[in-house]
Image (cartoon, rainbow, N blue to C red):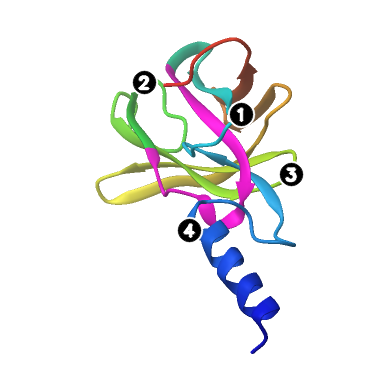
Amino acid sequence: MSRRSLAFLVSTGLALAAGAAAPGEDLVWVWFSKCDEPRSLVFELESDGRVIHTSRFSVCLTGRGENVGKQIAFPLTSKSSHFGEPPGSSVDVNVWEAGGERTGMILGVSFMSANRVWLNTLHFAEVDRQSTSTLAPGIVVKTYPVTNAKAS
């Protein structure tokens, strides 16, 4: 192996270890990652027109392999039945990053109770503008960018 080839392999390995994208690797948006210029996004879940959960998080344009596997989890209790569950019962909501693209992120969103998954779907969160998805009657997800605000 030539010195030049060895130097390339070493520099590529160091770049991957440091969290940088490898040469030729697609850059995509990843949440809860660390980078020099993070942006902030807000995730909101509305139930029957009321915001019942809000999370703010940082996103970075980086390599596909940088997804940290973090999830957002919270309960949804509503007087209405949105998925066929008994009215007034509690449903657990989980949100995770299902994938990244150049213009945003694909968020997985699931609603489940102890013995049943009521809905497992996707929401595309654009990093430069608001994205809205109606997931079920009365259930709306919104994501939008925040400027001049620190992500939590």
Identity of the amino acid at label 1?
Glu
Which SS does the magenta portion mostly show? strand
Image-quadrant location for residue 11? bottom right
Identity of the amino acid at label 2?
Ser
- Check the image and report above or below for 65 versus 6: above
Residue 21 in the image, given as x and y percentages of width and height: 63, 54
Q: Secondary structure at mark 4?
A: helix
Is tag 1's residue or tag 4's residue first in the polypeptide sequence?
A: 4
Q: Which mark is residue 84?
A: none
Is tag 3's residue or tag 2's residue first in the polypeptide sequence?
A: 2
User: Residue lying furthest left in this view?
Assistant: 114
Is tag 2's residue or tag 4's residue first in the polypeptide sequence?
A: 4
Identity of the amino acid at label 4?
Ala
State yes or no: discs 1 and 2 in contact (Cβ < 8 Å).
no
Q: Which residue is mark 3?
A: 102
Of 118 and 75, which appears nearest the observer?
75
Which mark lies nearer to you, 4 or 3?
A: 4
- Check the image and report above or below for 78 versus 115: above
Q: Residues within 10 Å of mark 3 (few under 14, many from 20)?
A: some
Span shown in magenta: 53-71
Q: Residues within 10 Å of mark 4 (few under 14, many from 20)?
A: few
Of 25 and 89, which appears nearest the observer?
25
Q: Residues within 10 Å of mark 2 (few under 14, many from 20)?
A: some
Q: Which mark is residue 17?
A: 4
Is residue 96 among the parts visible in the rendering?
Answer: yes
Which mark lies nearer to you, 3 or 1?
A: 1
Real-space Cα distance between discs 1 and 4?
Answer: 19 Å
Q: Secondary structure at mark 1?
A: loop
Q: Which residue is mark 1?
A: 37
Image-quadrant location for residue 8? bottom right
Q: Residues within 10 Å of mark 1 (few under 14, many from 20)?
A: few
Which residue is found at the position 60% from the left and 10% from the top?
148
